Structure formats: C-alpha cells, structure tokens
Amino acid sequence: MHQTIQPRTTSPTRRTPQLIGTALGHALEWYDWGIYAIFVPFFATQFFDDSNQLSAVLSSLAVFAVGFVARPVGGFVFGWLADRAGRRTAMMATVVTIAAASFAIGVAPTYAEIGAWASLILLLARIVQGLACGSELPSAQTYLSEIAPANRRGVWSSIIYISSVFGNTVGVLLGLVLTLTLSEADMHAYGWRIPFLLGGVFGLVAIYMRRKMPETEAFIQADRRRPRLWPELVRHRGQALRVIGLSVGFTVFYYSWVVAAPAYAISSLHVSSAGALWAGVTSSILLMALMPLWGRLSDRIGRKPVLLISTVGGAATLFPVQFLVRDSAWQLFAGMTIAAVFISAGVSILPAVYAEMFPTGIRALGLAVPYSVAVAVFGGTAPYLQTWIGANLGPLFYTGYCVLLLLASTLVIIRMPETRGKDLT
C-alpha cells in the first residue's frame, strides 16, 4: 500500500535555511564557473605553451567550452537523481563535485612542470565541474520554485540569478584585490590559484548549509511511483524545445555581458585589469538590485511581458552599446550597465518560467537536459566566439550573432502560454 510521507516543514520561519542553502550553493557554482573566465588571462600560459599568448588564451577558452559539453550528461544524471531521490540530495551532490573540481585546478601542476599533462588535468577538472553544473541550476531553481508562494514565485525566483551574479561578483572582486596587491608576474605565477583554492573552502560552507535543508512539499506529496523517464521526456518534448528556445538568447546575452566581458576587455580591448574588474563589479551590483523588482513586476503583469522587455530591449541596444565600448573602463562600465537593465528583466524570472512548464515528477530532469544542451552549445562557446570573432572579423559580427539569438528567443516567448501564478503539481 502506498504511504504518503508528510512534509517536514511548511512554516515560513523554516524557509530561511532553505533560501540560504539554495543561494550559497548556487553562488558557489557561479563563483567557480566564473573565476575560470575571469582569470584566463593569468593562468592560460600555466596550462598551455606560453610561446603564443593569444593561442594559450584561446586554448583555455576552448577548455571552458568543453566543460559545457559535459553539462547535458550531468543534467541527465543529476536531474534523474533530483526527480527520484529528491531535490536536496541532488543539490548536495552537485555542490560537493563543483567544489572538489575547483580545488583540483588550484593545486594542479603547470605546463612547464609536466607538459601537456597539465592541460589534461585542467580539461578533466572542467569536465567534472561541468557534469555537476549541468544540474545545479535546474535543481536549485526547481527547489526554490516549489517552496515559493504561487503569487510571489517571480520575485522568489530572482534569488537564483542574484546568487549567480553574487558568486561571479565575488570572483571579480577577488580578482580586483589580487591584481591590486600582486604584481603581474606574481598573478601569473601563483595568484591565479588563490580563487580556485577558496572555491574548495566555500564549498564546505555550502555543503553544511544544504545539509540543513528539508525536501520540498511538492516532491514529498507527489506520487512516489515516479513516471518512466524517456516516455515523459518525449511527452513533454514541446516544453523541452521551448526551454532551448528561451535559453539560447538569454544565455549568450548573460555570458557575454556579465561573465566574460571583463576578461574580454582585458585581453582583447586592452583595458586595464583593475579598471575592467571594477566595471564588472559595479554593473553587477546594479544587476542584482534590479532583479527582484523585475520579479515582482512579473507577479503582477505576467511573465511574458517582462521576458519581452528583456529580449527586445537587449536586441535594440546591443549595437549602440558595442559602439560605446572601446578601450576605457568607464565605457565598459556604461555598456555593462545598459546591458544589465535588460539582462536582469529576463534572468530574474527564468527559474519560475522553467518550473511552471513541467509537472513535479519530471520537473528537474525535464529542465536539466534541454537547458544544459542550450547552455553547452551557446553559453560555453560565447567567450571563445567573442574573442575569436572579435580578433578576426570585428566585434560587430559577434554582436549581430547575439542579436539574432535574442530575436529567436523573442519568437518563442510570443508563442508560449502565460504561466503566472500557476500551481506546481
């Protein structure tokens, strides 16, 4: 006879550990994922032949992209775990894996010490990290959406990307502190290791907090006889394709102007390291401040209008922003700030939009696989394409690529149903 397991908590006072644990773990993912892009100019020649600086940077960015290839596999494995063993179990597993891979990069020997084996160690660490990251975002946003009140799910969902930007901003701030206190030679020699080692330490804190998190009521109260995976994935293929269509524009927009912009400005536009990192930090603070406001607005007027503000506004302003940004940190700050206004509108509510597409029994996996595919193909290649296209064709060609993807996501938004306030069953 089927036995219903009672939820461990429904009290709002018990939601604080849930929110903190979700936010810290997700911030760790983006801290560890982001510091790679931020510190590429400093460690590229430590893992690859230093005879050609641009080649070493491009090789490091290629490894960045390969890490994304592992995300769909990780999304399937950890997404299956989240829908079978629980959201909390999957979130614990992802944060342990992410932190361990970050620590491994921090202690890895260099190309000068062991040759191409150093490149292989970097590659393997990023693949392992990619496996875990493939489900961290889907699991975390599924968890948060399931504990949020239906009429406030938009503003609650903004916590996910606030955590993402916060984690990335911590990495940028750390880069700023290190570049101001260490010489360029010291940054290349050992300074770049510090953020990766700290990622392992931060992981211990996130693990402790997630151990205290209860499972969501939606998962506990759902039928314990979970649906068969492949038939359910096929049955919800329309939603899966919608996830991909939504993700392509937002992913490239976000990675280009939040994650990779400071490193690109340093390596390709020759903006000073300190100036570029300051521009990244200050624009990210604005980004975080705007997200709950957009989330609250979506709870009032709907998800689709806010998503359209993001994609249409972003597509309309990217070319002017690209003309604005040249070789000055102030120009970079202005460009990143304008982009942040429109980026924040979309990413603040994407967790709620994704969660509202799928039923409980397949919510994590149904999102994890298509989302990871989209991020792997478009997000993982964004920093590489930004650098390569900028060097060989000019930055305007890359901007055109971003605009086309934002317009593709716009078409998906127009055709999708409105899901504001939907019950997650």
Image (cartoon, rainbow, N blue to C red):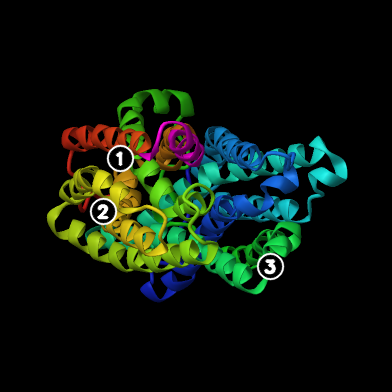
Image-based side of 97 in relation to 271, left or right: right
Taking depth in this image into account, of 17 and 12 the one nearest to the observer is 17
Mark 2 is on which residue type? Phe
Name the residue tied to disc 3: 183
Name the residue tied to disc 1: 357
Image-based side of 143 in relation to 213, left or right: left
Residue in the image at 42% along x and 70% along y = 15
Distance from disc 3 to disc 2, alpha carbons, whole Å, reads: 36 Å
Instruction: Give coordinates of residue 422: x percent, y percent.
Output: 23, 49
Instruction: Give coordinates of residue 2: x percent, y percent.
Output: 47, 43
Instruction: Give coordinates of residue 187: x percent, y percent.
Output: 69, 62
- The earlier-in-sequence mark between 1 and 3 is 3
Image-based side of 93 in relation to 193, left or right: left
Point out the frontmost of discs 3 and 2: 3
Above or below residue 419? Residue 28 is below
Q: Where are the magenta residues, as a range?
A: 378-395
The circle on residue 342 is: 2
Badge 3 vs badge 2, beta-carbon distance below 8 Å: no
Category of crowding for the residue at label 1, using alpha-carbon neighbours closer than 10 angstroms: few (below 14), some (14–19), many (at least 20): many
- The earlier-in-sequence mark between 3 and 2 is 3
User: Is 411 part of what is drawn in magenta?
Assistant: no
Instruction: Give coordinates of residue 165: x percent, y percent.
Output: 44, 60
Residue in the image at 39% along x and 23% along y = 234
Magenta span: predominant SS is helix
Above or below residue 235? Residue 163 is below
Distance from disc 1 to disc 2, alpha carbons, whole Å, reads: 23 Å
Q: Residue furthest bottom?
A: 13
Taking depth in this image into account, of 48 and 345 the one nearest to the observer is 48
Taking depth in this image into account, of 176 and 103 the one nearest to the observer is 176
Distance from disc 1 to disc 3, alpha carbons, whole Å, reads: 50 Å
**Quarter of the image holding residue 403?**
top left
